[in-house]
């Protein structure tokens, strides 16, 4: 039973560029959430997607956007990258029915130069 | 919004001893409290969770207690083993997005 998978594992970009990160949820899950984890900190909630719609959003600017596809996989897009966007980006999946728990992938390490 | 405080930031215990990590939350509407373990280079792994209608939950060497009145919850690990060494995060949720604490680095001394 495949867990949550994310790609790529590592990425290096420069300031001002745009990036797309990808996530496949755990088998049977229909809801995807994205988190940003800075070094030495706990993950911070970016947003959640269900039925291809953004259902809830944390305190992140509009530069952060997402998409969910009919097969429940998801993308996180970040525009106009800043040095402060360097972090581990985590995807978590869950079942909408009954909500939690959320299961996490191993993340994409994004470095901005 | 919700705010979660976690203590201590580092905890060192002798192998075989117990470890306790404590968290407080600010929003009384929070109703779901998971604990995650994160090893180096990996994503957070759910180890136990508790909902607001339950005061305590146990799973082998791991237990979580919840005090809704005081708005705090704790993780208890008994008979610690070297493989328990990791960073542990508590979290709280009202609806969907989880609010995490800053983490506790648990070190198991041989």
Image: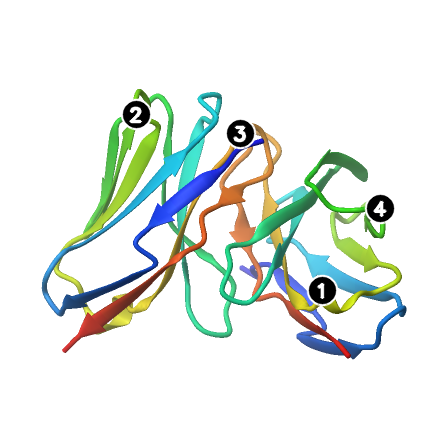
Residues at discs 2 and 3 in contact (Cβ within 8 Å) = no
- Residue A113, compared with residue B47, is above or below; it is below
Q: Chain of mark 2?
A: B
Q: Residue at x 34, y 41 (%)?
A: B23
Pair 4/3: label in front: 4
Residue B43 x, y percent position in the rendering: 52, 63
Q: Which residue is mark 1?
A: A84
Distance Cα–Cα, label 2 vs label 4: 36 Å
> How would you rate the neighbour count of disc 3 (Cα within 10 Å): few for under 14, some for 14-19, many for 20 or more?
few
Same-chain status of marks 2 and 3: no
Return the chain for callout 3: A
Label for residue A62? 4
Tell me residue A33's x, y (percent): 65, 46
Pointer 2 residue: B70
**How many residues crowd mark 1 within 10 Å: few (<14), some (14–19), many (20+)?**
few
- Is residue A51 at least partly visible in the picture? no
The residue that disc 3 covers is A98
Q: CA distance from mark 4 to mark 3?
A: 29 Å
């Amino acid at each position: 039973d495949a867990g949550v998978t994310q790609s790529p594992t590592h990425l290096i970009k420069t300031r001002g560029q745009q990036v797309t990160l990808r996530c496949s949820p755990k088998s049977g899950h229909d809801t995807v959430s994205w988190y940003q984890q800075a070094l030495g900190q706990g993950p911070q909630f970016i947003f959640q997607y269900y039925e291809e719609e953004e259902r809830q959003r944390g305190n992140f600017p509009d530069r952060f956007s997402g998409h969910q596809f009919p097969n429940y996989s998801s993308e996180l897009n970040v525009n106009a990258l800043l040095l402060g966007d360097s972090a581990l980006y985590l995807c978590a999946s869950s079942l909408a029915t009954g909500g939690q728990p959320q299961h996490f992938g191993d993340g994409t390490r994004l470095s901005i130069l | 919004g919700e705010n979660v405080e976690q203590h201590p930031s580092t905890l060192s215990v002798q192998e075989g001893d117990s470890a306790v990590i404590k968290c407080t939350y600010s929003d009384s509407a929070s109703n779901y409290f998971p604990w995650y373990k994160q090893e180096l280079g990996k994503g957070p792994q759910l180890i136990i969770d508790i909902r607001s209608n339950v005061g305590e939950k146990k799973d082998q060497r791991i237990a979580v207690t919840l005090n809704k009145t005081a708005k705090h919850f704790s993780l208890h690990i008994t008979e610690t083993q070297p493989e328990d060494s990791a960073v542990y995060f508590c979290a709280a949720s009202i609806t969907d997005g989880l609010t995490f604490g800053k983490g506790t680095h648990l070190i198991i001394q041989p």
